[in-house]
Amino acid sequence: MDNSAYWKEEFERLADRIGKLKAIVAIARKMLVVVWHVLTKKEADRHAQPEKVASKFLHWAYDLRREGRQGIRAGEFAGCKLKEIRMKETVYSVRRSGRTVRLGPEDE
């Protein structure tokens, strides 16, 4: 919840009304429902921040190394994953280690 303003606000709203412990359980349940929808529908959470999602996909791409990405560039891999969750149209590049990484094929 620390990384998401939405979940933090939702938790605080619930905690004021029903108490912290019940709010934790309620938020955990809501997050589980979101994860289920993301995995079954293959689309991003409506409260997701596109730049953060893109950055996480790029980090994953670098962790996999080229062999794990079937030889494609890290930026292209991240772009493909964004496209799979219907988020490609919202972010085109990510800043990483002081440089801009384009998300998608070189010819885009």
Image (cartoon, rainbow, N blue to C red):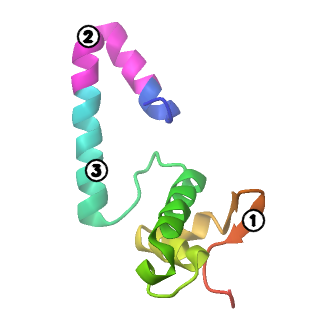
Q: Amino acid at mark 3?
A: Val
**In this rendering, which labeled residue sits more in front, label 2 or label 1?**
1
Q: Quadrant of residue 37?
A: bottom left
Q: Position of residue 42 (x, y in %)?
A: 32, 66
Identify the image quadrant of residue 40.
bottom left
**How many neighbours does mark 3 have within 10 angstroms: few (below 14), some (14-19), or many (20 or more)?**
some
Where residue 46 sits: x, y (%)? 43, 50
Q: Where is mark 3, residue-wise?
A: 35
Question: Residue at image x 55%, y 64%?
Answer: 58
Q: Is residue 19 magenta?
A: yes
Q: Is residue 23 left or right of residue 61?
A: left
Mark 3 vs 2: CB contact within 8 A: no
Q: Residue 96 in magenta?
A: no
Q: Is residue 81 visible?
A: yes
Indicate the quadrant containing the N terminus: top left, top right, bottom left or bottom right: top left
Mark 3 element type: helix
Q: Earlier in the sequence, mark 3 or mark 1?
A: 3
Q: Residue at x 51, y 80 (%)?
A: 66
Residue 18: mark? 2
